[in-house]
Amino acid sequence: MSTGAGTAARFDLPEIDDFTRPYWDAAAEGRLLLRRCGECGKAHHYPREFCPACWAGEDRVTWETASGRATLYTWSVIHRNDLPPFGSRVPYVAAVVDLAEGPRMMTEVVGGEGAEPGVGLRVGMELEVTFREAAEGVWVAVFAPRGA
Ligand SMILES: [Zn+2]
């Protein structure tokens, strides 16, 4: 893959378009946004224009700020990832969390007990959203043990 001189390819950055811009703007302010359907009442993540549960149109689906609370569903400590920039970040904890509002989200768990990633984690533990700057002005939602 060629990306031109001096530009390292990165695989952790989102494609930001007009539809997802509110999500990324909120993340930069430390808020996690969800999409909520006015037809069936379900929230979803990642953001889609239409409701993935009942296919209600974009006029029925709106942004809302999530509580930022979640519980840990599953995780894996990643020791090797050859896609930049992950190689320089290993080991890290890739996780799937259940947001308090219902949606399941792929993310990363940071912090917690001890220096060893993954130590002290357990299924169902309470997590809270926090944000990491992945690139200039681009903040991604990650989770940390509540009260940590
Ligand atoms: Zn719906």
Image (cartoon, grey):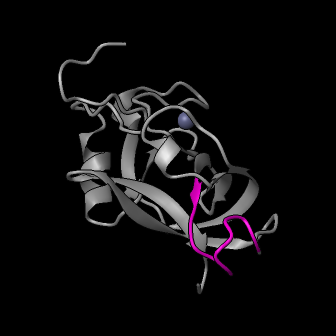
Query: On the picture, is 119 further left or further right than 102?
Result: right
In screen coordinates, is 6 left or right of 92? left
Q: Which residue occupies the foreground of this view, 68 or 102?
A: 68
Give residue 116's quadrant in the image.
bottom right
Q: Which residues are magenta?
A: 108-119
Residue 100 or 110: which is nearer the viewer?
Answer: 110
Figure check: 104 above or below 13: below
- Residue most extreme to the right: 123
Tell how many labels. Answer: 0
Rendered residue at 46%/62% (across/down)? 66
On the image, the x and y values in percent for residue 42 come to: 58, 45
Was residue 117 drawn as part of the magenta stretch in this picture?
yes
Quadrant containing the N terminus in the rendered view? top left
Ligand 1, image quadrant it occupies: top right
Question: Is 115 inside the magenta-drawn segment?
Answer: yes
Q: Is residue 51 above or below residue 121?
A: above
Residue reaching furthest to the bottom: 147
Q: Position of residue 134 (x, y in %)?
A: 34, 51
Q: Quadrant of the C terminus?
A: bottom right
Q: Position of residue 77 (x, y in %)?
A: 71, 53
Q: Residue at x 62, y 71 (%)?
A: 127
Q: Residue at x 58, y 40 (%)?
A: 40
Dominant secondary structure (helix, strand or loop) of the stretch shown in magenta: loop
Q: Is residue 130 left or right of residue 76?
A: left
Q: Give the image quarter of residue 48.
A: top left
Name of the residue lying farthest toward the left: 5
Looking at the image, which residue is at 68% across and 80% down? 114
Decide which of 66, 124 is in the foreground and name it: 124
